[in-house]
Image (cartoon, helix red, strand yellow):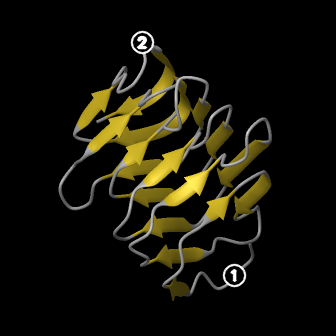
Amino acid sequence: MDNATSTPQTNPYAFSIQGGSFSIGNGTSAPFLVSTSGVNTLLGVLAGVPATFSVNSGNFTIATARFNTGTAANGIATLNVNGGTLDVPLLQCADGNASAASTENFNGGTTIVGDPTPATFYVSSRGTGVVNVASSAVVMCGILDVERAISSSMTGVVNLNGGDRK
């Protein structure tokens, strides 16, 4: 996605990244995108089809609904924050069922879960969730719930290799 002037773009639509890759920002562009939809943003919707969402620069804000990753049986989701800002009300990962898999890589930039009130970041809601925090990344949330395990005994893993968790 490109918006070289970083003018805020607000839309009432939810994102559903079923498979493939979607990136915001690059070396010369820092878009500012705000979703005001009351419908959850989904990443990794199709069984066995990898889905990747990357924030490289700029700002991606979900104003009212959750950001759910690994949302289907055998869903495969990867969230990368390499720069810029990801701002979501609630982040729920590996959410589909016990066979869902989700990896969140925070390599740079700032991720805010809950704004202005810090909210819960669920690493493993129903499936296997892995979070990697490295380099200069900042992850801000109220509660980092590593193993929610709603419908299974699947585990969550958090690897801190730099960065900052607030």
Left or right: 131 with respect to 103? left
Q: Is residue 33 above or below residue 92?
A: below
Q: Which residue is drawn at 26% across and 60% down?
A: 115
* Quarter of the image where the N terminus is located: bottom right
Q: Label 2, on which residue?
A: 153
- Residue 60, percent across and down? 52, 66
Q: Residue at x 45, y 28 (%)?
A: 126
Distance from the alpha carbon under mark 2 to that under mark 1? 43 Å
Left or right: 15 with respect to 51? left
Amino acid bearing label 1 = Asn
Mark 2 lies on a secondary structure that is: loop
Observer-nearest of 106 and 156: 156
- Asked whether the viewer can see residue 137, the reply is yes
Q: Rate crowding at label 1 as few (under 14), some (14 to 19) or many (20 or more) other CA atoms within 10 Å.
A: some
Q: Which residue is drawn at 37% across and 71% down?
A: 63
Point out the tag, 2 or 1, that comes first from the N-terminus.
Answer: 1
- Residue 149, percent across and down? 37, 22
Q: Label 1, on which residue?
A: 3
Q: Residue furthest left?
A: 117
Observer-nearest of 148 and 136: 148
- Residue 113, percent across and down? 34, 49
Q: Residue at x 35, y 32 (%)?
A: 165
Disc tally is 2
Mark 1 lies on a secondary structure that is: loop
Observer-nearest of 64 and 127: 127
Left or right: 15 with respect to 133? right
- Asked whether the viewer can see residue 84, the reply is no
